[in-house]
Image (cartoon, helix red, strand yellow):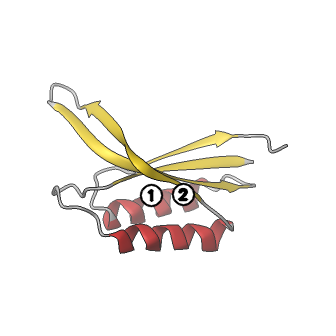
Amino acid sequence: MSLFQILLPLYGGDGTRIARSTFRAAADDLVRNFGGITIYMRAPAKGLWRKRGARLERDDIVVYEVMARRLRRREWRIRRTDLERVFRQEKVVIRVLQVDQI
């Protein structure tokens, strides 16, 4: 079983807040395709990173999680590209962990 963690920013690359409807549409798509979702958005998490030689960047993020029996890399690459476009980001981070369900 694979657990996918999708880190979504509250603000687009241009600094404007992402509309709630954008988050709802992403959640609806994941529920439709994976049967359920867990959303962590009570207190946004802080993402910090530094590109080589550049200033410190930060994002306020929420985390969407879904589980799937199979890891379909091609489908997830397409999904990530779509999310990057919709959320106006250079890169949306999607982590995958192999888990045992008991």
Residue 56 is situated, as x and y percent measured from the top left of the image, at: 19, 30
Q: Which is nearer the eye, 20 or 8?
A: 20
Q: In terms of secondary structure, where does tag 1 sit?
A: helix
56 or 21, which is in the foreground?
Answer: 21
Residue furthest to the right: 102
Does 27 appear above or below 9? below
Q: Position of residue 41 (x, y in %)?
A: 44, 53
Q: Amino acid at mark 2?
A: Trp
Residue sitting at 69 percent across and 47 percent down? 2
Label 2: which residue?
A: 76
Q: Is residue 82 left or right of residue 4?
A: left
Q: Which residue is mark 1?
A: 80
| Residue found farthest to the front | 42
Image quadrant where residue 69 sits = bottom right
Q: Is residue 100 left or right of residue 97?
A: right
Q: Is residue 86 left or right of residue 70?
A: left
Disc 1 to disc 2: CB gap under 8 Å: yes
Q: Quadrant of residue 29?
A: bottom right
The type of residue carrying mark 1 is Arg
Residue at x-position 38% and y-position 51%: 92
Q: Residue at x 31, y 46 (%)?
A: 60
| Helix, strand or loop under label 2 | helix
Q: Residue at x 34, y 39 (%)?
A: 46
